[in-house]
Structures are given as C-alpha cells and as structure tokens.
Amino acid sequence: MQRIAKVTVLTALLLLLWSALFASTFRYPFFWDDFHLIRPYSGTEISSAFHAVADSDKIETPGLRPCSIFLYNFQGTLFGDNIVAQRLFVLVLMGIFMIAAGTLLLELGLNLLQLAIVFSLFVSSRVFASLVLWVCLSHLIMAYIWIVLTACFFVFWVKRSRWVFLLLMLVTCTLATFTREETYTLPVVLPLLWLIAFFDQSQWRRVLAAALSVLAIVCAHYCLWHYFVPNALSPEFNLGAIKRFLAAMAAACLPCGSNWIGFTDTSIAIAWIMFLIALVAFFLLLARPHVRLQFLGVCCLGALLSAPALGVARSFGIALPTLAFMTAISIAITEIYARAQSRNQFRGAIMIVVILCLAVGIVGGIHRSKYVAESVQENSAWRMVRDGKFLFDMFEYPPTIPPQRRAVGLARLKAFGIQSADDVKSLEKTLRQNRDQPKQQPALPNGLTLAKYDYLSF
C-alpha cells in the first residue's frame, strides 16, 4: 500500500501540473468521433456489439470491442454533453493507468527516482496530450489499464503462486482483449517481463501456464473477431507495415514526436537524439552486465509493444512503447550515475548534464503538446472538416448524434461560414491543395486557422 500511495502522489502532482498548463483545453467541445460514440446506447445496440462491430453506425474501424460500448454508454449517460466533466473523467482514467503502471514498474525493481523520470517524460510527451484531448479515446486508456493490471497479476502469480492472481490475470486480460486488440502482444510480453525483472528457472511452469492461458484468450478473440467481422483489419507484413512500425517506435522514443517543422522544433529533437546516443554509449561502456541485459530487454519490450502499428499506426496509440522506452532511459541514467559515484568520477558534471538533457526532453514534449492542443481548437481548419463530416451526415450511414449536440456543433460551424456538406468538401479540397505550404500561415478566411501539426501527425 505504501508503494501505491507514493505512486499516487507522484501521479497526482504531474497531472495537476499538466492541467495547469493546458487548462484552456478542458472546454474544447466534442471532436470528430466523439459526436456519435459518447452517448447513451440502447439495449439492442449494446447486445449487438457482442456479435458484430461495436459501432452500430458502421463508421469506425471494424472490430470486436464490446467492452468499449459499456464505457461510452457510462460516459454518455452520466456526463452527457458536459464537456468539462467528460475531459476530467478521461484525465482520471489516465491517472489510474499511471498508478497501475507505476505500481508494476516498482514491483519489477525500479525505484521512485527512476519512476519520476519515466512519468515526467511521459506526461510531457506528445502522446499523452493526444490521448487525453480526444474524449472517445477513453476506451483505449481503459484497455491500457486492463493490460497493465494483467501484467501486475502475472507478476504476483509468478512470485507468490496464488491461484487468485492467475484468475484475476485472466479476467483483466479478457476485459482488455474485448476492449482493444493491443493485448495480442501479451503472450510474449509477459514472459519477457519475467526474463527482464526476476529470471528464476524454478518459476518457468507458472510463467508458461500464464502465457498459454493468455494466448488462448487472444486466439479465441481473434477467431470470434474474424467470424463476426469479416472485413476486420489484420496485421500486414510488407514494406508499408515495416515503415509504420519503425515510425511508431521512433515516435515512442521522442517526447516531442518524430515529425519536426521549423528550426526550434528540429533543434530540440536533434538535441534529444544526441543525448540518447551519448547516453547509450556511456551506458554500454560503464554498466554492469546484468543491467545491460535489463536495458536491452526493456528496449525489446518497447519494440514489441509497437507491433500494433503493423496493422494501423496511430499517433495516439504508442503510450505503452513510450513508457517502455522512457523506462530504459531511466535505467541507463541511474546506472551511469551509480557507476560514476562508485568510482568518484565526474558525479556533479554527469548530474548537471543529465538534468539539462531531461529538461530538453520535457520542454520539447510540452512544446509539441501545445501544438496537439492547437490542432483541436474550435477554429482549427482540419477540425472543421472532421466535425463537418459527422454533423452533415457525409458517411455511408448517418451517425447517431444526440440532437442538442448536433445543434451546438452546427451552430459552431455556421459561425465560421460552414453551412453545408458542400462547404466542408470545398474546405477540405483547399486544405489538401495547400498541405505542403509552410504551416502557421495567417488565419484562413472566416477566421479558421491552420495548425502547425495535424492531430494525427507523429
């Protein structure tokens, strides 16, 4: 309990700091898929999610994700169109995820200082802002919570051999799998966690039992998914998939993202990359053999957790690999400092350099997060296009949007001169024709602005 209390305090402090910096975003209205996903659902819609696509409007990516409907129904019923309450709820979910992840990392052998480094880099990163600024991504955060709890119960099961932990692991794994398909990596992730943290040959039977049980759940979901949803996405293994996978890994290593525009953003990113190169070089030179293996294992874990990008690469879908790579960074930093301290060499200089470089990563992440927030402002041009497609029923099937929410959204578009589907198409055509022009130009006609980075940009 003492560990959980420390993690909770650290998480609360970081979330309060983030909230203070991004206080204006709490009143940003519903965005894009929020319009039709966050609402009360009928019993028929909920039951159909167990044998068909979760989205009854057939707009979202096809998938068997029935647990997400319960969450959306809860949000839509309890909070309705209260956008501040919705955003606070998403932030609370993120806090729960971080507390669970922090507890797991401490259980695996990290100390509180290392955890503070990991969480500081994560909360300031672009992916954190991307997750919490889109209300309907609550289901992805919930999936992360179940995934991390699955890993926690796996660790407890291996260490203590109590059957209740194996049962809880299977329950949380099932909930995670029927929320998002990110759990498909768990049959390999769990044994890798065991190898990294506390390899003990006497525990291999418990590890194997857990891994095979999780594999059975994943395989069952995969079969049901492709039976009930014939057009479901599947991982690809071609050049495009490899590019997406590498892009996701690169973005997970960089708090400021992997796409840079302008001198300032490029300079911050290059400074961070140079720090990473120097950090790895000194780590390999000074680290003890078992810590090197631990570092390598965590990096492999980050690569493995990036595997969902083989299907679809999402700029908001790299929270788990980001946490893994930031953990590897914290392991390297503390090991270098410990070795320098034991030799009484350059301790002060190393500490100053590390603090300055971490500051670069944190400031760079916040800097890029500001652009993420800018891309979902009410007067953002691309936001107008995405919102307009829902509000003017521009899909094959009309989206189910609560009447009051639709009326408010239409009034907002009208204030910017967008009064029909043709206006939306015209604006989208203009934006696509000028996509390669320098960003952050003067405001577009009707008061719309062009964000420096698109929300979906890595």
Image (tube, rainbow, N blue to C red):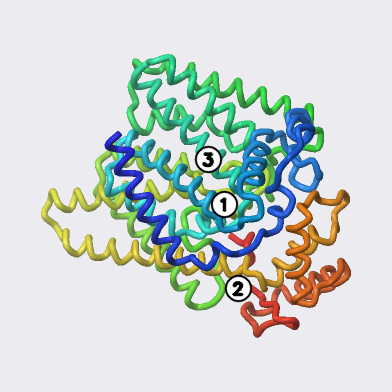
Q: In the rendering, at what x and y percent does residue 1 appear?
A: 30, 34
Residue 122, placed above or below residue 188? below
Identify residue for label 1: 248
Q: Residue at x 35, y 45 (%)?
A: 8
> Is residue 445 or residue 366 the one in the foreground?
445
Look at mark 2 in the image and give the residue it sits on: 452
Q: Are marks 2 and 1 in contact (CB under 8 Å)?
A: no
Q: Looking at the image, is 353 positioned above or below residue 147?
A: below
Q: CA distance from mark 1 to mark 3?
A: 17 Å
- Kindly indicate whether the residue at mark 3 contacts the one at mark 2 (C-beta within 8 angstroms): no
| The C terminus lies in quadrant | bottom right
- Which quadrant of the structure image shows residue 391? bottom right
* Percent coordinates x, y for residue 44 in the rendering: 79, 32
Q: Is residue 427 left or right of residue 374?
A: right
According to the image, label 3 marks what residue? 144
Quarter location, residue 393: bottom right
- Type of residue at label 2? Lys
Which is nearer the eye, 87 or 248?
87
Alpha carbon distance from label 2 to label 3 = 29 Å
- Mark 3 belongs to which amino acid? Tyr
Residue drawn at x 22%, y 61% is 350
Q: Is residue 78 left or right of residue 428?
A: left
Could you tell me how far apart the alpha carbons at marks 2 and 1 are, in whole angstroms?
A: 20 Å
Chain-order first, disc 2 or disc 1: 1
Total label count?
Answer: 3
